Structures are given as C-alpha cells and as structure tokens.
Image (spheres, rainbow, N blue to C red):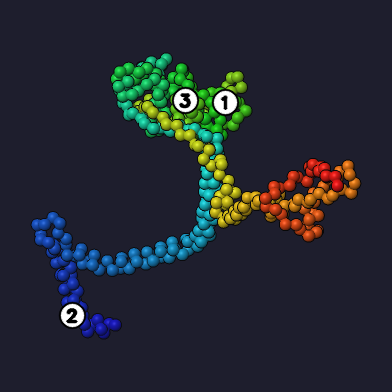
Amino acid sequence: MESVLGRYRNLIILVGVLFLQVLGLATQVKRGGGNDPESTRLIRIWAVGAISPFERALVWGENGVSDLWHNYFYLRGVRAENRQLKDQIEHMRIDQVRLSEDAAQARRLQTLVAFKEQFISRTVAAQVIGSSGSDLSRTIYIDKGENAGIQRDMAVMTSDGIVGKVLVVYSSVSQVLLISDQSSGVGAMLEKTRLQGVLRGTANGEVVLERVMSDEQVPVGETVLTSGGDQIFPKGLPVGTVTNVTSGKDLFLNIKIKPAADLSKLEEVLVLVEKQERQATAEQNVHVRAADILAQRLPSVPDKPATDTKPVPGATVGATTGVPKPALAKTPAKPAGAAGTTTSQTPKTPSSMSSGPGVPADPAEPNPPPSNSQPPATESSPQ
C-alpha cells in the first residue's frame, strides 16, 4: 500500500488540489446569475443531485413496507367484518320488507275506516317585524294580514317546527301567540310511545307537556309531534324534544320540552292558510271478492237451450219431461141389459192405455177432463 501511495503521490496530490479548487469554485458560482436573488449555488445543486437518488430509494422502500402492512397484515380481519356487514344488510332488507308490509297494511286499514288526514296545501311567508316586549305576553307581529288571506287561529311555523297561532288580524299586520305563552295550548304527542298531552307555556317562558299520567314512561330526548287534536296544527309537525321529566301534581308528569324552532330568534315564518283533507274511499274494494274475480277469468258453462213447450192439439204435455202424451178417446156407451137401469162410463187413465192397444185420438175432440174429476153419468135409452 505504501508503494502505491509513494508511486502515485504526485498524482494523488494533484487530484486533491483540483478537487478542492473545483469545490471552492462551486461554492462561489451561482446558477441564474449573481444578481438574481433566487439563484442557487452550484454546490447545492450538485449535493441535491447526489443525494436525491438515495432519498428516492428510501421513500420507495418506506411506501412499499407501508402498503404491505395496510394491504395485507392490517386487512386480515376485513373478510370477517365484510361477512358481518353482509349479514346486517340482509337483516336490514328483511326489516325494510316488513316495514313496507306494515305501511301497506296501515293504508288498507285507513281505506277501510275512511280515514281523514290533513295535509298542508298552501302557506304564506311572512317576516317578523316586532314582539310584545313583555314577560306576561309572549307574542310577535308579522307583516301579513287580511290582505294576504291571514285569518284568526291559523298555524304559524318555520322549517324547524311550529311557532304559534294567529291571535289578532289587522289589514296588513297580524299578531301571533307563541307556544311559550301561558294562554297557548297545542295538542301534542310523543313520537315513539304515542302518548298524547297538551303543550303549554309557563311564566318563565318554558314549554311543558301536560296531561300525561305519572305511571307512563317518558324517556329524555324523545321527539314531540303535533297530534292534530286542536284542529289548528296538522298532525305530525315537529314540536321539540323532551329535556326533563319529573313528577307533577294530580298524578300527572311534568315534562319540559325544548322547542324545535328557536322562538327567540325568529325572522321569517310560514302561515298555514289552507289545509286539505284527504279521505280514503272504502267502498271501492268492499264488494270485490276473489270468487267474483275467478268467475270472470274462468270459462263459463253455456246455458241449456230452451225447450218448446207449446201444447199440441189433442195431446197433453207432461209435467216433467215435456213429451206430449196421447189424448184419451171417447168410448161409446154400452146398451143396458134392462130398462130403467143406468150405467156410467169411466175414462181410461194413461197408464191403462199404455198397457193396452191405443185408440187413435180424434183431433176434433177436446182434451178430456182431469183424472180426479168424475165424468157425468149418461142415461141409456130404453130398448
């Protein structure tokens, strides 16, 4: 090793000096011009170019390891989770079918009992222009009145829930009584338990649900809807949620409600000016039976052709078969053996005629009298 260094000592020194000189020039020379503030020294460019391949290889290896972890080791339990999700989807589909059947059954029952339900038909948008400013009366004023079709006791609501009802109507202004007022009253019910009560306001501006028995279970957070019993608000509009349930007086619960609409920040409201009632017609499907439908679809048996029952002269038509029977012939009277004696003739019955030789009937003779009537007696002339 010493011989190699000693033999090429001058060459190694020359290469080292040249390298130091080039390195010194690279630290002084800038790419992009010396006066350009964004110019970069040449030594920095060379360093970035030399280190970038190693950094790129390091990042590629790190990404490969991360992908291997997330795509294989981390996802080993995904198959079982996927199976569980598929089972949940199947159960949800079954529940959806069951709920659809329940909804269809409810519609059929509504049709049978001629159920009436109110729907919102037309509303008028109004802007809140003032309030009462008193704790004893919680009312607001809107900029719509009789000119816009507003009338007393019309429902007022927002997109979040009900607000109140129209109390006083002027030509262009109306006064609205809020549900938080003590004199207000709204028919309400709980969404899940379907318990009904009366929604009223308190002196401090809270909203409570009254007339719910103390033995009922009312969970906190349950949604309260309008019941439609007050004939002002349609059924099913959001009222609020239950915040607190305590025992009240007279065996009733004291249920505090948080209104769905923010009554303290009302700016625009909707006035329900027209409601529509839809009644299901139960008479449409009452008289339709499965037997009638099958009778219409199945081929029917043709009717039996009518028989000609017109009587033939000189013949008697049978009561059951409709076949004409021969008429009875008149038998001449036999001469009596002694004077003064009388003889009677008895007509032959059809049964006796069928056993013996028949006598041709005279077409000019009328039909004989019925068999149950006795023919008149004939008197024979003396010899």
Where residue 305 appears, as percent x and y from the top left, is 60, 54
Task: Note whether residue 262 is visible.
Answer: no
Q: Is residue 62 shown above or below 369?
A: below
Q: Which residue is mark 1?
A: 212
**Mark 3 neighbour class, 10 Å CA radius: few under 14, some 14 to 19, many 20 or more:** some
Q: Which residue is located at x 52 percent, y 44 percent?
A: 104
| SS for dot 2 | helix
Instruction: Please tell me which residue lies in front, 165 or 357.
Output: 357
Where residue 95 appears, as percent x and y from the top left, is 54, 48
Where residue 108 appears, as percent x and y from the top left, is 54, 41
Task: Give whichever of discs 3 and 2 has the lower sequence position.
Answer: 2
Q: Which residue is mark 3?
A: 231
Q: Which residue is mark 2?
A: 10
- Tag 3–tag 1 contact (CB < 8 Å): no
- Tag 1–tag 2 contact (CB < 8 Å): no
Amino acid at the residue labelled 2: Asn
Q: Is residue 256 left or right of residue 21?
A: right
Q: Is residue 176 left or right of residue 188?
A: left
Amino acid at the residue labelled 3: Gln
Q: Which residue is located at x 17 percent, y 65 percent?
A: 42
Q: Residue 197: which disc?
A: none
